[in-house]
Amino acid sequence: MQASDFSQEQLVLDLFRKEERQKGRQLLIGYISDAAKQRKFKEADRLRGLLIEIEPTALFDIIRTGEIIENEKTAAVDKNILAVWSALIKIIELKEFLAIYYSMEQRRFAHKEMVITQGKQNSTLFFINSGRVEIFFQEGGKKVPIKSMGAGEVLGAGTFFEASVSTINARSLGVETSVLKLDTMQEWQKDYPGLEAKLIDFCSRFKITADSFVTTGQDRRTYKRERISGTVKMILFDKEGNDSGIVAKGELFDISAGGASFFLRMSRKSNARMLLGRTVGLTLSLSANVMFNITGVVRAVRSQPIVGNEYAVSVQFSRLLVHKELKDLVASTQ
């Protein structure tokens, strides 16, 4: 344990060095309580972490200081916020909600300000506290409305939990949000290991799926997809377009004139997210005699919940396949 520059912590450490442990512990508990009452929650959590470190067997005091901090955090949350997010609080513990709430930034978007832009990456989750946003997409230079979202709904889940570019636009109609960043969420994973799964479950009800586009009378699949079997070798290119030496192999799923989808196994979710937007070279092995090479850009990497560490990768080809090419590729696997 290293002493820090914080004067309060130094006083406590000095008492422990002098073997005045009870006096040091009571002083530290007082500091934790004061920090919590002053709503200096990061400081209170840090000091409680010190208590756990130097007195790990003082379970009563560890539990009591945790309750003090949680009670003060709860009291500091606007009651309207608790009401808006009552559905979320029903499926997660209060301390988990507080962990989310106090790790977020509060942001208000002006009327007609863009919240999410179609075709761009988004690593932010927007909890709508009040107001509304309109959801739409651009196609052929035209605006196609989908729906609007309001208080108690979460925007951005589709690109936040999975590595993919946004397929929709979200524009503010005057909305106040709590903003959760991806790297911030990862900070509380150790203390609340099951929280991400609960959050994914809650946010799934707000995902804008292909069914949402069907209700608008639009078919967003510009090119028909054909089921295909075989293997794929993917070579990752560096920023200069050169072979990086990183190779992955997977199983083909489908193909269209514009791109292909396949399954890859990856040990870490962070590796999957790093693929998004990268240029790759693909070698499709469709039979003993048919191999096809093409380059493209990774547009989506989505985890498959049934099979651990497996991801569905979607690549947009650098050029469109002509009709005969596509026909021959599909026929070679039938």
Image (tube, helix red, strand yellow):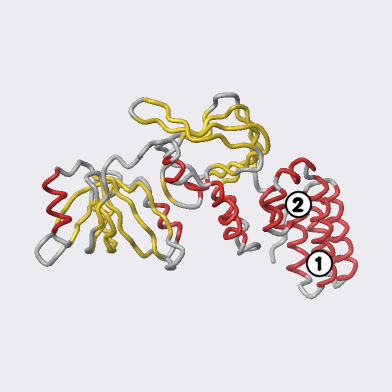
Please name the amino acid that badge 1 sits on.
Ile
Q: Position of residue 105 (x, y in %)?
A: 65, 41
The residue shown at (27%, 55%) is 254
Depth check, front residue: 214 or 121: 214
- What is the number of the mark on residue 43? 2
Depth check, front residue: 318 or 235: 318
| Of callouts 1 and 2, the N-terminal one | 2
Please name the amino acid that badge 2 sits on.
Glu
- Residue 57 relative to residue 216: left or right: right
Asked which quadrant contains residue 144, the reply is top left
Depth check, front residue: 139 or 294: 139
Mark 2 neighbour class, 10 Å CA radius: few under 14, some 14 to 19, many 20 or more: some
The residue shown at (72%, 52%) is 98
> Relative to residue 331, is residue 107 depicted above or below?
above
The residue shown at (75%, 44%) is 83
The residue shown at (54%, 52%) is 204
Q: Position of residue 162 (x, y in %)?
A: 46, 52
Dot 1 lies on which element? helix
